[in-house]
Image: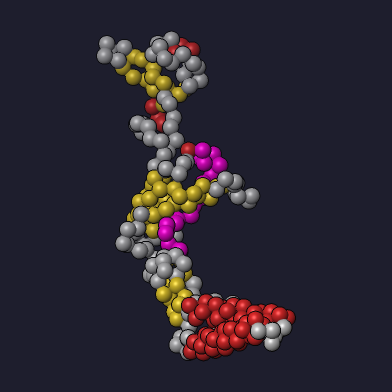
Amino acid sequence: AVKAGETLLTLDQEERTLKYEQAQSELDSAILDHDANEKLVLQGAKSKTQFETMKAVLSRAKANLETARLELSRTDITAPFGGIVENTPPELGQLLRVGDSVVSILDIDPLIVKAFVPQTDIGELTLQTTGVATLLTGEVFTGKIHNISPSAQNSSRTFEIEFALDVNDKMPPLGVSARLVLDLNSVTAVEISPAIVSLSTPSKTADATASHNKTNDLIVKSVDFEGKVVYLPVERVKT
């Protein structure tokens, strides 16, 4: 792993140093010529046109020195952000051309698990939704949703979400599959056997609790504290 600003490799400085020294020498010469010709112009022995040419040479020499200085200062290639080096950096002495790829860094802050959520459930998720991701390796990480796609996939009509893992100092292998369980709005429920559930009828609802006054609802038969048979409504919840 590398940190932001850490030096990944250093380019050879020899050629850049020579160019800088040459540019410095040209600037020193241009300054001498400029100062000498300025005196001649004041004495009337040199035309102003010739002196303007000398001033242009001096300006160009200053610009060349600044360019050489910048090139010399750009020999250290540093990491733009923290992450993991994915490929092998160039070896000592290897020739690199302008535009060549030097190092690939994987951004692991945050480390993301991508998942797809049906459109019927996407409304229950927010950027504060927490959960647990279990990797195929058996490692378990907590975390929360980092990003929710604003639009559904054209083919599956599902929404892509990004779940950020709380990895701390424990770095899992990258690219493995994971099972994601999200903490949605919870309700208290009891699992009952379908065998004791029936549809309500007008005759049954007459003896049911006051809150249950609809027909064709799911009900269960029970006995109250007075020993009377009552029919209680069943509310189904989704797991």
Name the one closer to the observer, 16 or 77. Answer: 16
Instruction: Let me know if residue 212 is in the magenta part.
Output: no
| Left or right: residue 214 compared with residue 47 | left
| Left or right: residue 37 compared with residue 68 | right
Residue 3 coordinates in the image, percent (x, y): 39, 67
Q: Tell me what residue is drawn at x 56 percent, y 42 percent.
A: 119
| Left or right: residue 181 compared with residue 224 | right
- Is residue 162 in sight in this rendering? yes
Q: Tell me what residue is drawn at x 40 percent, y 11 percent.
A: 210
| 222 shown above or below 81 | above
Coloration mode: secondary structure
Which region is colored magenta? 107-123
- Give the residue at the far front of this rendering: 43
Q: Quarter of the image for the N terminus: give it.
A: bottom left
Q: Tell me what residue is drawn at x 59 percent, y 83 percent.
A: 35
- Is residue 95 in sight in this rendering? no
